[in-house]
Amino acid sequence: MKNSALKGALGALAVAGVALIAKKAIQRRRFIKGIFDEYGIKKKSPFGLADKIREMNEEDYQELKGKFKKEFRSKCCKKDNTCEA
């Protein structure tokens, strides 16, 4: 009986972990979709994004780069979530 309860608890923990990972993936997908829409990228692939980056001026590129850094930075660097990368 004790082993069955442990398996159930571990199963519930695994389901919760998968749900958190799926939630983060959905958030990141929305972010990427928003970038494609904001910059008018019709080809929804990394190659379309690269083509658009090549066409950008330095100011627009730095703005886009900052958005990506903010969205995809590691949360483990510092307490205030600022990374030097």
Image (tube, rainbow, N blue to C red):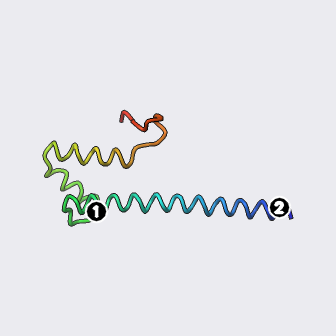
Q: Position of residue 43 (x, y in %)?
A: 23, 65
In screen coordinates, is 71 left or right of 3? left
Residue lying at 28% horizontally and 44% vertically, measured from the top left: 66
- The amino acid type found where label 1 is placed reads Ser
Q: Residue furthest right?
A: 1
**Count of labels in the image:** 2
Neighbours of disc 2 within 10 Å: few (<14), some (14-19), many (20+):
few
Neighbours of disc 1 within 10 Å: few (<14), some (14-19), many (20+):
few
Please state, as top left, top right, bottom left or bottom right, where the N terminus lies in the image: bottom right
In screen coordinates, is 84 left or right of 19? left
Q: Position of residue 84 (x, y in %)?
A: 36, 33
**Which structural element holds mark 1?**
loop
**Mark 1, residue position:** 45
- The amino acid type found where label 2 is placed reads Asn
**Mark 2, residue position:** 3
**Which structural element holds mark 2?**
helix
